[in-house]
Image: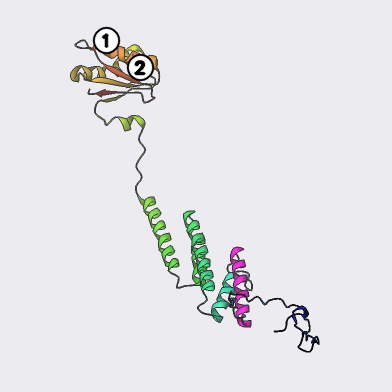
Amino acid sequence: MVGCQGNVKPSSQGVVAEAIVPPVTAPTKPTVTDTKVSEKITVEQKPALTAEEIVTQRLIVQGDIALEEQRLLTPVDDNANLYFQVVLGRDPGNYQAIQGIAAIVDRYTQWAWQAAQNRDYQKAARNVDFARSVNPEDPVITEMTTRIQDLKDRRRAAAAAPRKEPVSQREALMPKIGRFILPKTLFSLPEEEIITEIQPIIDEVAKTQQSLAIYWPNDKEARLIYQIINSRVTEFRVRAMIFHRADYKVDLVSE
């Protein structure tokens, strides 16, 4: 290569040879090669909906709105059942429409059950009929019909069962052995009648030597009952417990 002029040697004839200097060009920037391989990102674009699919989606949206607003079968030209049935006519396997129809049936059968629980069986029957008009093959309708009929049968049987005559408190407590019911107005009676009411208790205690459970709301009167009984049982000291309850009874209890 030819260097700069300072490095050029003179010729043998003493003539300085003209140096041929190549044209100076602007230095070029080194090309930087990116060692990374750029990844090609492929974005899958969903195919655009067809005109028919757009109509179907709009019908489903309208059906959902009508369902939320309880427009299930009315108005005749703007109700949930109408929109979902039209969708199924266009696309028989449409999942959203099938779910929408099932939701309408569920709504009517639940209303039917609520009416039956309130003994409004005519309203219950109407709601079941509405559900059947939406999808007569839905098993939920058969299940609810049976459930309502069972409820009616149980209520009918309960109404036909003979009613027991109410018994007084005294009659209800008397059958138990060792139980003595005393009149609430015991201490408003003359002394002789008080002793007459308590005497059966005295006789039984003297025979069985059992303890007493006295159920009486007034503590003073309860203690007086005990004193009367204990004073007339001379063979042993009668033991007793007092319960401040308005049962007006004395039970003989074994320890």
Q: Position of residue 143 (x, y in %)?
A: 41, 64
Residue type, label 1: Ser
For residue 244, the mark is: none
- Residue placed most toward the observer, 188 or 122: 122
Q: Residue at x 26, y 12 (%)?
A: 230
Answer with left or right where residue 185 lies relative to residue 7: left
Q: Which colour assignment does the render follow?
A: rainbow
49 in relation to 146, above or below: below
Residue receiving disc 2: 222
Residue type, label 2: Ala
Q: Residue at x 32, y 12 (%)?
A: 192
Q: Residue at x 20, y 12 (%)?
A: 236
Q: Quadrant of the C terminus?
A: top left
Helix or strand or loop: what does disc 2 sit on?
helix
Helix, strand or loop: magenta stretch = helix
Q: Position of residue 227 (x, y in %)?
A: 30, 12
Q: Residue at x 27, y 20 (%)?
A: 212
- Residue placed most toward the observer, 121 or 22: 22
Helix or strand or loop: what does disc 1 sit on?
helix
Residue 96 lies in quadrant? bottom right
Residue receiving disc 1: 231
Q: CA distance from mark 2 to mark 1?
A: 14 Å
Estimate how packed mark 1 is, as few (under 14), some (14 to 19) or many (20 or more) residues with alpha carbons within 10 Å: few
Q: Position of residue 23 (x, y in %)?
A: 78, 84
Q: Position of residue 131 (x, y in %)?
A: 50, 68
Q: Which residues are magenta?
A: 50-68
116 in relation to 74, above or below: above
Is residue 58 a member of the stretch shown in magenta? yes
